[in-house]
Image: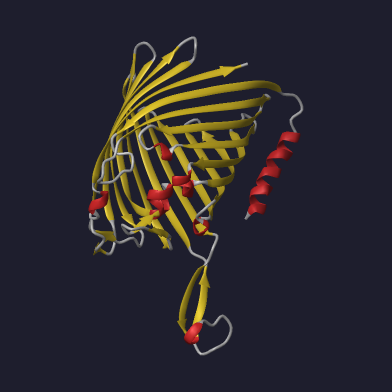
Amino acid sequence: MKQRACGLFLLTLSLLASVNTATGQFRFETDVTVTYDDNVFNNSRTEGDKIAISSLRLGYDWETESSLTQLYYVASLQYFSMVADRTFQYHATGLEFEKSFGEDNESLFAAGFMYGKRLDRNAFAFYDHHQLSASIGIKHSFAETMLGQASYTFRSFTFSQLGDFDYIEHQGTLKLTTFLETQTSVILQSDIGSKIYATPDISESAGFGGRMMGRGGQRVEQSTPSVAQLSGLLKVGQSIFEGTGLSLTLNYQRNLRKDSRYLSSAYGAVSDDEIFDDHYGYEGLLRSVMLTQLLPLEMKVRLTYGMQDREYTNLPAYDLIGNQVADTRADRRSFLAIQVEKEIEPLHLSVVLRYDSITNTSNDPFYHYTNHVVTLGLTIPVQF
């Protein structure tokens, strides 16, 4: 699998070698965000925290008439003031390449390679991991009103303390966007992904001798666990009048193979979703609506409301003392977000104020909770 990632990287380098003349430019961008979260662990215990997030992105661009190459480094720090042990840092470096071709530059080829590392404090060191990813894709304009995209992404995750959760992922995406005369845009997208754990499952079954035999005549069998997921998205955007737009989104994800792994704890099983924010851990329908309004003084307001059903794969529900109450944990997550953005010219600064409200209802009472988050962020880009 690593050979595939290296192959994509070498392909990108070979394309870079074809660039004859290019202009170079350094980029520097920093983000500072302050967040208050009244339920930072997203459970019924409702423990709040104040989080300061700072990030730095350094990059260098090579640009020609038909191509753009970007080499970058990103570093970020999330500091938790109440639960300081949750503080962590993340570092990543990568290379991205784009090249247009065709008589009217109607096609765009893109490839990328990235390596990242997360570092946590001792109490949460099980989050520590190395990430390697490579991607390749193409966009093609079939007409002025139709754009098609296809891409493939490879990812590899290696956890420092939880080797049983090491995995590789393959994901393919097809996307079609159309623009209608009624100032309507329609997006259709299909994704298929596979998450394959690096270490096998070992089980015992009755046998009568031979290789791979355990105690008491039990046959030891190994299997490679994996999760395969298919998702489909429909998004319709409509311009209502000048400066106002409305979009509706439906996204359904279905697990075709369901060999998820879980951590055990004093409370019960803990799913991939809680530990690593893994969408492979559940299936269900997401529906949302977003209203966007442009305001004077380079301001923009977005209002989003949505609801998502999450049926967890092979994960039971428990009561608060650890007794199983259902074979499958099922959640319904509703959310409301209000975001105000302000561009400050000519400094090119961007200020964002955001409020999120989340209500999660579950047949597992430990995950029956509400969550309110307020975020203020500032982005400062510099080019030279």
The percent position of residue 379, horizontal first and vertical second, equals: 47, 21
Front-most of residues 128 and 175: 128
User: Left or right of 352: which side holds 337?
Assistant: left
Residue 329 occupies quadrant: bottom left
The percent position of residue 209, horizontal first and vertical second, equals: 54, 89
Which colouring convention does the figure follow? secondary structure
The percent position of residue 123, horizontal first and vertical second, equals: 44, 46
The percent position of residue 117, horizontal first and vertical second, equals: 56, 42
Whether residue 355 is situated above or below residue 310 in the rendered picture: above
Residue 185 occupies quadrant: top left
- Please indicate, yes or no, whether residue 160 appears anywhere in the rendered image: yes
User: Left or right of 203: which side holds 285?
Assistant: left
Whether residue 71 is situated above or below residue 169 in the rendered picture: above
Tell me which residue sits at (51%, 46%) in the image.
128
Residue 353 occupies quadrant: top left
Whether residue 44 is situated above or below residue 201 in the rendered picture: above
Front-most of residues 288 and 165: 165
Tell me which residue sits at (24%, 44%) in the image.
369
Tell me which residue sits at (70%, 43%) in the image.
11
Front-most of residues 257 and 126: 126
- Please indicate, yes or no, whether residue 278 appears anywhere in the rendered image: no
Front-most of residues 183 and 127: 127
Tell me which residue sits at (62%, 27%) in the image.
59
Q: The C terminus appears in which quarter of the rendering? A: top right
